[in-house]
Amino acid sequence: MATTPAVGVLALQGDVREHQKVLTDLGAEVVLVRTPAQLEAVSGLVIPGGESSVIDKLSRIFELADPIRQRIEVGMPVFGTCAGLIMLADTVLDAIEGQRSFGGLDVTVRRNAFGSQNQSFETQLEVPELGEPPVHATFIRGPVVDTVGARARVMASLPDGRVVAVAQGNLLGTSFHPEMNGETRFHSYFLDRVAEHAA
Ligand code: GLN
């Protein structure tokens, strides 16, 4: 029987536990990634929500930023939610001075595009690729995808047209937090990419 490859959750800051639980419930072996050696041991990575400027800073201090960039370049599947999507975007608007992303996704995102913490909201989001029912999506100071480049594709938009989920090859990013609502289909999609890539 084939063994399922281990997947990582970048565990520098943010809602690490929630992702760990969804992935574990789906049957995945999960490694919390804080060192380059732990990164090497995983076949895919989830970047949680939190604060992208902090994740950026800590990833450099922990010497994970360049190794993550290199793995993204060679096709490692990565799923980023909220701050995680910001870390995957090639271009970030309204970043703090000196803030960098890992990049990989051919998109421009705008941080905090939905306003402050108390303007957080939840909505039922149609995601055609995931079928029915719609996704219960929680937005907490999330980014919006301002521009979708030729290599990326839109997975979901709000009724007003703002893009909030994108994919490109083995990369997936959402402006919202599926891990907070018992939603597992994005994580399943990610694990499928991991299984395919490892095969
Ligand atoms: N506003 C945060 C940032 O810019 C993202 C918020 C979140 O991940 N819930 O990183």
Image: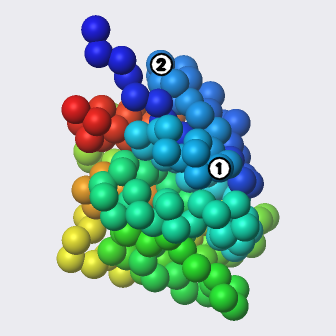
Q: Which residue is mark 1?
A: 35
User: What residue is drawn where x is 78% and y is 64%?
Assistant: 118
Is residue 51 among the parts visible in the rendering? no
Of residues 162 and 33, the one nearer the viewer is 33
The label on residue 27 is 2
User: What residue is drawn where x is 38% and y is 69%?
Assistant: 104
Which comes sooner in the sequence, label 1 or label 2? 2
Horizontally, residue 51 falls left or right of residue 182, namely right
- Residue 153, position in %: x, y? 26, 64
Residue located farthest toward the top when viewing the structure as drawn = 1
Of residues 72 and 92, the one nearer the viewer is 72
User: What residue is drawn where x is 62% and y is 87%?
Assistant: 94
Q: Is residue 36 above or below residue 149?
A: above
Element under label 1? loop
In the picture, which quadrant includes the C terminus? Answer: top left
Q: Which quadrant of the view contains residue 150?
A: bottom left
